[in-house]
Image (cartoon, grey):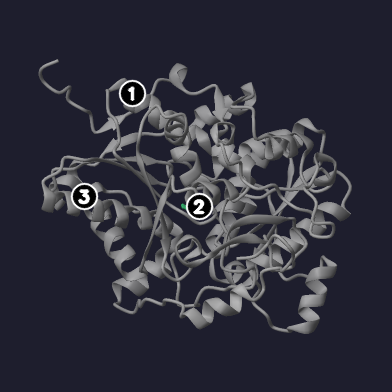
Amino acid sequence: MGEERKIPYKIYLEEKEMPDSWYNVRADMKNKPAPLLNPGTLKPMTVEELSGVFCTELCKQELDDTTAYFEIPEEIREFYKMYRPSPLVRAYCLEKKLQTPAKIYYKFEGNNTSGSHKLNSAIAQAYYAKKQGLKGVTTETGAGQWGTALSMACAYLGLDCQVFMVKCSYEQKPFRREVMRTYGANVTPSPSEKTAVGRKMLEEFPGTTGSLGCAISEAVEAATTQEGYRYVLGSVLNQVLLHQSVIGLETKAAMDKYGIKPDVIIGCAGGGSNLGGLISPFMGQKLRGEADYRFIAVEPASCPSFTRGKFAYDFCDTGKICPLAKMYTLGSGFIPSANHAGGLRYHGMSSVLSQLYHDGYMEAVSVEQTSVFQAAQEFARVEGILPAPESAHAIRAAMDEALKCKETGEEKTILFGLTGTGYFDMVAYERFNNGEMSDSIPTDADLEKGFAGIPKFPGNEF
Ligand SMILES: *Cc1c(COP(=O)(O)O)cnc(C)c1O
């Protein structure tokens, strides 16, 4: 082959080229992610135990470490067609701006009303709830992206959707709240009078503005005390990574079509779902010894689960009612500085990604928020898309890799996940534009306080 084929700005798959199965990377892992444990017995959770909280089909997906492909049900594929395939974009303008010999690509998941990749799993989870004959689902939301995605999915399927929204977000992000209500969701500020956990919280800490951990506890209680309801979660879980593999499968199909092979694959990491989804098919190749790639997880310096956390069994929620997961964690009591505006504030990390990182298949970097917003601004000005602050973590790391290539002259191919848009994050952008944003990096002593809350039992040394 002589001349390189001209790569278009946007590579779209055709509908018929969209994946018809999700890929489960656990099937190709020699060291499987450690099982969820029952916090009472410290024994692995069974489908029966989990199915009081989650839909039965989703419990099966959660615990299945061996089935490589799960067929995507027809109804979900139809829903995906409303906003998928999502474009794979060649960032020609950014390359030019950076004057780098690197080739930069991003997979853009912000092209739907909820504004992020979360819709890919929301529709799957709502579908299985509907199929099980349930009345509705409950969940928590912090900034609101997950709640919005779930509201859209539930509206489509005619399911009731109850969202516990952290009170400070409920008050400070009225637009997200109203998007959810427009899609028919019932949105309650957390802590609330609706649950025992909420009432206890309000009694102990009157005037509290809430936390994600408390909202999770309320949503789980609401699911288990109302007949015909189950709880759904937008990140961290194995099932969520499985659904998000649609991102990576589409990306790989689009790249294969043009004979492109990425050298470095980069994604932001909150609970790990978009990163896990983007890298899954590529990681599968690496695990099977078919190809090699560098994978980089990007996290905020103010919430550094991978780069400074412990690999141990820990609680998934502050209320300590959820199962224990083995993961990189800062401790369930860790709360990032109030100064931190850029999302990705979860204390733990997907067990799948944690195991892969632990086994050396993936790298991780942490970035400071002012440099993240700088990258977001630079990207918006040349590529046109106003990125979510979460997504901008990946942009920062991709730009840093491209700038390294400028020094070495290497023509690397860099792929990153652009998970969403930032229209509801303008207060954070305002702080950046006013020069009022600063960085906050926890001290070792701050982290020790979080680590002290990690449960201690034989076999859980860290
Ligand atoms: C929720 C969210 C993330 C982080 O979640 P992961 O599970 O780590 O992918 C990243 N970007 C956007 C836009 C989000 O809404």
The answer to whether any part of residue 189 appears in the image is: no
* Residue assigned mark 3: 402
Observer-side mark, 2 or 3, equals: 2
Ligand 1 closer than 8 Å to label 3 CB: no
Q: Quadrant of residue 332?
A: bottom right
* Residue assigned mark 2: 358
In depth, the one of 382 and 56 nearer the eye is: 56
Which amino acid type corresponds to the residue marked 1 in the rendered image?
A: Asp
Q: Report the side of 335 relative to 133 (left or right).
A: left
Which amino acid type corresponds to the residue marked 2 in the rendered image?
A: His
The answer to whether any part of residue 379 appears in the image is: yes
Which amino acid type corresponds to the residue marked 3 in the rendered image?
A: Ala
Local crowd size for mark 1, using a 10 Å CA cut-off: few (<14), some (14–19), many (≥20): few
In depth, the one of 283 and 435 nearer the eye is: 283
Q: Report the side of 262 relative to 103 (left or right).
A: right
In depth, the one of 407 and 456 nearer the eye is: 456
The residue positioned 34% from the left and 34% from the top of the image is 88
Q: Quadrant of residue 315?
A: bottom right
Indicate the quadrant containing the N terminus: top left, top right, bottom left or bottom right.
top left
The residue positioned 46% from the left and 32% from the top of the image is 281
The residue positioned 27% from the left and 23% from the top of the image is 259
Ligand 1 closer than 8 Å to label 2 CB: no
Q: Position of residue 156 (x, y in %)?
A: 65, 36
Label drawn at residue 256:
1
Q: Looking at the picture, does residue 62 appear above or below residue 268? A: above
Q: Looking at the picture, does residue 287 appear above or below residue 211? A: above
Could you tell me which secondary element the residue under label 2 belongs to?
Answer: helix
Local crowd size for mark 3, using a 10 Å CA cut-off: few (<14), some (14–19), many (≥20): many
